[in-house]
Amino acid sequence: MVRSALRVVLLALAFAIATLVLGWWTVPVIGAAWGLVDREDRAAAMIAASAAVLGWGALLLWDASYAAFGTLARRMGGVFSAPAAVVVIATLLLAAALAWGAAVLGGAAWPRPQRRN
Amino acid sequence: VRRFARPLLGAAVLALALVVAATRVGPLPPLGALLDPARGAWALARTAELPRTATATIPGLHAGVDVRYDDRGVPHIFAKTPDDAYRALGYVVARDRLFQLDVQTRAAAGTLTEMLGKRLADVDLETRRQGMPWSARRKLALLDSASDAGRAFRAYADGINAWIDAMPPAALPLEYRLVGARPAHWSPINTIHLLNRMALTLSFQTEDLDRLAAEALVGRVAADALWPLNNPIQEPIQPVERRGPTVDRSRLPPPGQPDSGSLLALASIRRELATSTRDASSDDELAIGSNNWAVAPQNTRDGHALLAGDPHLDLTLPSIWYEAHLVVPGVMDVYGVTLPGAPWVIIGFNRDIAWSLTNTGSDVVDFYRETVDDSVRPSRYLLDGRWLSLEREVDTLRGPGSRVIAVDTILFNHRGPLTRQQGRWLSLRWLALEPSADLDVFPRAARSRSADEFMDAFAPFAGPAQNTLVADRGGTIAIRSTGKMPIRPGDGLGTRIRDGSTRASDWRGFLPISAYPFSRNPRQGYLASANQQPMDPRASAAYFGANWFPPWRALRINQLLRADWSVTPEAMRRFQTDPGSPRADVFVPEILAAVQRVERSGRGDSLLHRAAALLSEWDRRYTRDNERAVLFERTMSERAARTWDELRPSGSAERVWTPPSSTLYRLLADSGSAWWDDRSTANTRERRDDIVTASLRAALTKTIDAHGDPAAGGWRWSRVQQANIYHLLRIPALSALDLPVQGGPVTLSPSQGRGTEGASWRMVVELGPTVRAWGTYPGGQSGNPASVRYTDRLPQWLSGELSPLLTPTMADSLGRQHTSAVLSLSPRR
């Protein structure tokens, strides 16, 4: 359990740093890589999605530590004709979808090692 | 199947996520870059406010520049040379208003499609066909790069580009993210584009074509009477030796026979060019205008000259203005508002003088009917019996990514661009398109030490002509309508489309400056302008223009200033949002008198009686809480529809043009005029009182339909008329809408129509031993919608309050308590 949590946190850190340094497109890249590396684990995609949400969530928290975040969220919500919270949730869902989909494909792209009985 | 289900689902989810993340889906921008929490739109929360301290380098800077932002977000720029000050100004404007700089310039350059796509192709094509980018290129080619203006434009561009190059990804404005664009580098021609755009707003008047349309319906004599060269109510800018306005209420000639044939064909031209709304009580009440006035020391409480100015323009977010203070010791110390995109203070003050501008509205646009060799694809035009070649410019309209959207061919002759309207070719001569040597006037004027010096510095200003009002610490006040005014052949008027086949139709030159309307230290002790006719026609026969703005604001300023012999800065501030209305003062009694006459003759009824009773309760002030202005305005609209039905072509619901309310005032003196007759009632000939009372009855019925019972609160002015300040992209979430304001049509702080125009800057300056000033504008210094400075001045603007403007002489004298941020700029090594 602790090990799984640690994997999520470390992967979240990777998502956050890569997004910070290179941009959003690193999420599916890292997600695919994770799916490939952890292809033995059927929960690999869920771990990737959770980590992406956590990583982007941390970055959003950093943004939210600035007073202007509330105004910005309201304006963004207005632009999309949606409540501010919906835009925040959409942000996290986008990260989750990119990471999950890429991890599933990453895991399927390479044959899973045969289990030894 | 189960083996492939999960990968297929994964592929589908990833594909969908990638599509919305990386591409535009319908109106949605690519969401990946937009929602990226590290460098996407969310990151704007981190850059919304200026950091307490920052440093930057700008190439070309000669020495360090200290920028101190005060607690209103105004940068005070302390530089060693003017060029360095302009570099710093470019940098700070770009830092606060980058998207605005870009989009405003594109609008004037006809390149909006490159950023916003092909839906703006018609707008860009219109801009290009008006010759604006063509003109900007000609002006740039003639600009001496070593001149003050040339150096200032270059320095300003350096500053903007330094910010673009150094801008962290997180600071990319939200609008770029929404439209999926990037800022382009700034070039000095962009400043010329911006000035051209301002000229378009202030001087591109197509009333020649409106007049033609009216002539086609009611004949030339009647049209000339409805839209006279001289306003029937005169309270000119250049004062005359009498107290109060003069009024001409002589009888109007009746509608004449419609002019037919070619006139009707030409009349349709205006359909394509005119943009104003036609359902108001009169077009002049929809016009953008401005106020400025100055009071001489003998009329002020403290014995110091006072000056106030409030230009009325489109209200936008971010605001059209950017406030700044530029200090170059021994050379320049000027405070005021700049247009983002131009390096100068346009309206402001220094340590000795203050100045403000209103638009003169002089006629600097003429159309000419051209004779061409081919009605579809002409290559030559006829001039004095000779065929001359047309200049041909093939213009390519590009969309995002440089893909070609449209190719257009624009023709020019010696007058300007040609347009084809209803099979006829018209050329346009418009002063604003012509190169001039006036680009240095603003910095020179800003360095003036006295009102006289200011007037000398401003003298070469080409246009669009401005009523330049100045006051100095010595107590001098002066005003001059400054700008080139064409001398035309023949009758000298610019109200007709001229024959383009002869040079004899061309302008003969320009009026000498001695002919400009001017006044200095008049006996009345004040000067005021509100876009009214600048000079009493009995004082000068020179033609400055026609179709002057309505006189109502001018009358009100004059009323207020005549009544106050001890004016204070506080009174000046109060006047700027005064809710009084000479228009209502004139028309309400006329309406009520008509009701009395009708009731006395036994033709009254309960509806009319009730309407009159409600209207008579009004104090004729457009306060937010008043509940009767709505009935008056509705009555005026109804009355316009009934009175000017002759100006509605058969089968059309719209009038081709609506006479000004001052013409209506003149008509009201003639109870039996043929204009009162309603054409739709064949066997009845209506008279004045029939129309006025029918309008009032209809107004009451319609007002109740629209706003409920008068006692239910729905008639409150704040619920009927609001200011609407739209974001430049008209995105409601980034706009400030439905704002209750004090003021109505043609009050000193006007609010009319859709409420999208109004006082864009308010300033009061006291020219005492130490100059003191107050000001505000609707919006805020920042263009970042997340910033508190995006709209922080709105409450103050709505309430008519002003902030003291700080004018530190040195960087350190601003004081810690007033310093919100510090920016240190240094040369790039």
Image (spheres, coloured by chain):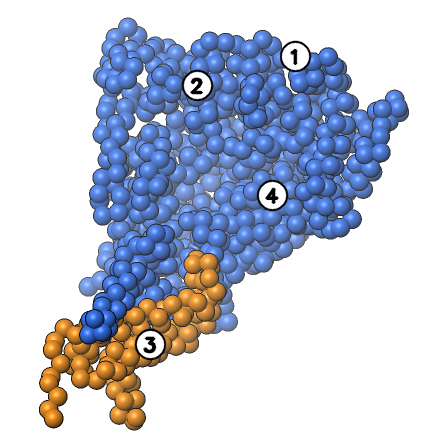
Chain colours: A orange, B blue
Give me the chain letter of mark 4: B
Quadrant where the C terminus of chain B sits is bottom left
CA separation, marks 1 and 2?
Answer: 32 Å
Element assignment for label 1: loop
Q: Do circles 3 and 4 both sit on a common chain?
A: no
Dot 2 amino acid type: Ile
Residue under label 4, please give it: B751
Dot 1 amino acid type: Pro
Q: Which of marks 2 and 4 is nearer the N terminus?
A: 2
Dot 4 amino acid type: Ser
Give me the chain letter of mark 3: A
Picture coordinates of residue B171 (x, y %)? 33, 63
Q: Which of marks 1 and 2 is in front?
A: 1
Residue under label 3, please give it: A53
CA separation, marks 1 and 4?
Answer: 33 Å
Q: Which of marks 1 and 4 is nearer the N terminus?
A: 1
Instruction: Answer with left or right where residue B34 lies relative to residue B685.
Output: left
CA separation, marks 2 and 4?
Answer: 36 Å
Give me the chain letter of mark 1: B
